[in-house]
Image (tube, helix red, strand yellow):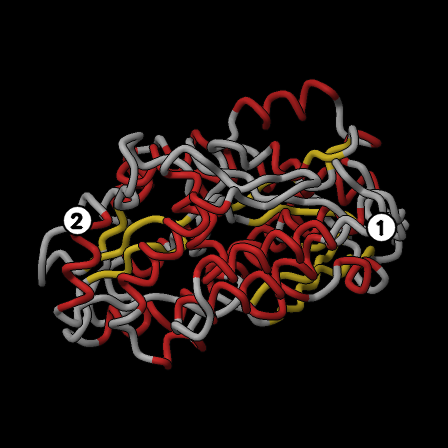
């Protein structure tokens, strides 16, 4: 009997991140007797901050966040997918991408991961308490009445800034230079501050999971105006109350566009001794058949557009995919250069201080621009 092939994978600890890849590994093992994929998991904060090169030294497969791509693209720790995936297979997945999910993992001429989960900042609300809002002015009024809860922990506080600047048609830069022009930056911070001035300090320690847990468990809050889609909270029985996800509230006149893209992708370590097998697994998990079937049945939030368009997939989530599709299709792709991840931490702290009222908007914008320029110090100005 041939030796058992054991692949090691790392994902994140939410059921949305862990359950579907474990189920996929189990099914893949049935299709490939003698192959086992063992998954470890880390917290959401660890997922957003742990350097990919550290993971690639220990694991064959990794579920990653696209902003990390720039820091590893030229360091030889990830396997370019086109090394073992055919051009046709990659083109098919690109055509089945929700918005820019597939593109978000393409950098410097290589595809570094395949989207298995699509997400961006959308609106989450308790439909049993009040209707959804359409405009940012309505968000401000809801906040004045104490009905708004908001994830303001890093990096989400910075994502809010990104989303509003892009929504008014003047998005932040993704290449070397100033991050944002002073007028637009000031306007976005003032609009964010109009909501945050009514927020509890505890929100600065809350990520989307903490916010959605609170929104779904009590009747104090009605609305999270910008929060990454977590479809599980729309499922029957996941929490005490079901949450409706719909397109983001708008500040500009361009509709619900410009939301800061999130989601996750399946990447492969360059150190794996089974690159063909890992590639086959990644292609299969990202494919429509798995995504609209086994993946969603195991708590997954798909990244494949065929799953998003499936009425049965939507029915279980109060039509979360249908109702946020426009926001996802027009989402904004944040910077991915080598050095960006450090800026994301620094920029989040600057925006948080501005929203707390500790620094004036003009000073905050100047600091953001200074730190953004400095993030290109290693020479990557792409």
* Residue position for label 1: 378
Mark earlier in primary sequence (2, 1)? 2
For the N terminus, the quadrant is bottom right
Instruction: Tell me residue 230's x, y (percent).
Output: 38, 56
Asked where in the image residue 336 lies, by quadrant, the reply is top right
Instruction: Tell me residue 338's x, y (percent).
Output: 77, 49
Instruction: Tell me residue 220's x, y (percent).
Output: 16, 75
Q: Residue at 19%, 50% (x, y): give it.
A: 137
Q: Residue at 75%, 39% (x, y): give it.
A: 279
How far apart are labels 2 and 1 at the CA level? 43 Å
Q: Point out the frontmost of discs 2 and 1.
A: 1
Indicate which disc residue 281 carries: none
* Residue 294 visible, this angle: no
Q: Residue at 70%, 40% (x, y): give it.
A: 176
Instruction: Tell me residue 195's x, y (percent).
Output: 27, 63
SS assignment at label 1? loop
Asked where in the image residue 82 lies, by quadrant, the reply is top right
SS assignment at label 2? loop
For the C terminus, the quadrant is top right
The answer to whether residue 343 is left or right of residue 207 is right
Q: Residue at 27%, 42% (x, y): give it.
A: 250
- In the rendered image, the vertical position of residue 256 relative to residue 234, given as above or below: above
* Residue position for label 2: 133
Neighbours of disc 1 within 10 Å: few (<14), some (14-19), many (20+): few
């Amino acid at each position: 009997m041939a030796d058992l092939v054991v692949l090691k994978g790392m994902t994140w600890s939410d059921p949305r991140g862990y359950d579907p890849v474990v189920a996929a590994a189990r099914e893949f093992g049935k299709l490939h007797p003698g192959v086992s994929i063992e998954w470890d998991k880390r917290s959401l904060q660890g997922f957003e901050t742990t350097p990919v090169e550290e993971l690639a030294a220990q694991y064959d497969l990794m579920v990653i966040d696209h902003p990390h791509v720039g820091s590893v693209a030229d360091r030889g720790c990830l396997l370019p997918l086109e090394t073992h995936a055919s051009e046709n297979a990659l083109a098919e997945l690109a055509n089945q991408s929700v918005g820019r999910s597939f593109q978000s993992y393409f950098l410097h001429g290589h595809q570094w991961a395949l989207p298995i989960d699509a997400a961006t900042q959308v609106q989450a609300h308790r439909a049993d308490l009040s209707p959804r809002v359409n405009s940012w002015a309505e968000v401000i009024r809801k906040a004045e009445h104490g009905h708004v809860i908001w994830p303001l922990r890093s990096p989400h506080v910075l994502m809010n800034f990104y989303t509003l600047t892009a929504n008014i048609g003047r998005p932040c830069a993704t290449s070397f230079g100033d991050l944002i022009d002073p007028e637009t930056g000031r306007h976005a911070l003032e609009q964010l501050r109009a909501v945050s001035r009514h927020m509890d300090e505890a929100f600065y320690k809350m990520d989307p999971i903490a916010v959605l847990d609170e929104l779904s468990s009590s009747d104090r809050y009605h609305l999270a105006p910008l929060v990454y889609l977590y479809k599980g909270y729309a499922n029957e029985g996941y929490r005490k109350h079901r949450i409706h996800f719909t397109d983001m509230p708008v500040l500009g006149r361009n509709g619900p566009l410009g939301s800061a893209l999130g989601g996750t992708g399946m990447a492969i370590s360059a150190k794996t001794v089974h690159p063909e097998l890992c590639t086959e697994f990644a292609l299969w998990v990202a494919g429509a058949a798995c995504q609209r079937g086994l993946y969603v049945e195991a708590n997954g939030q798909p990244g494949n557009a065929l799953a998003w368009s499936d009425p049965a997939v939507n029915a279980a989530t109060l039509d979360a995919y249908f109702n946020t599709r426009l926001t996802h299709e027009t989402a904004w792709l944040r910077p991915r250069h080598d050095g960006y991840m450090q800026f994301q931490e620094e920029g989040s702290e600057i925006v948080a201080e501005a929203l707390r009222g500790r620094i004036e908007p003009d000073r905050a914008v100047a600091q953001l621009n200074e730190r953004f320029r400095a993030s290109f110090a290693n020479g990557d100005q792409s």
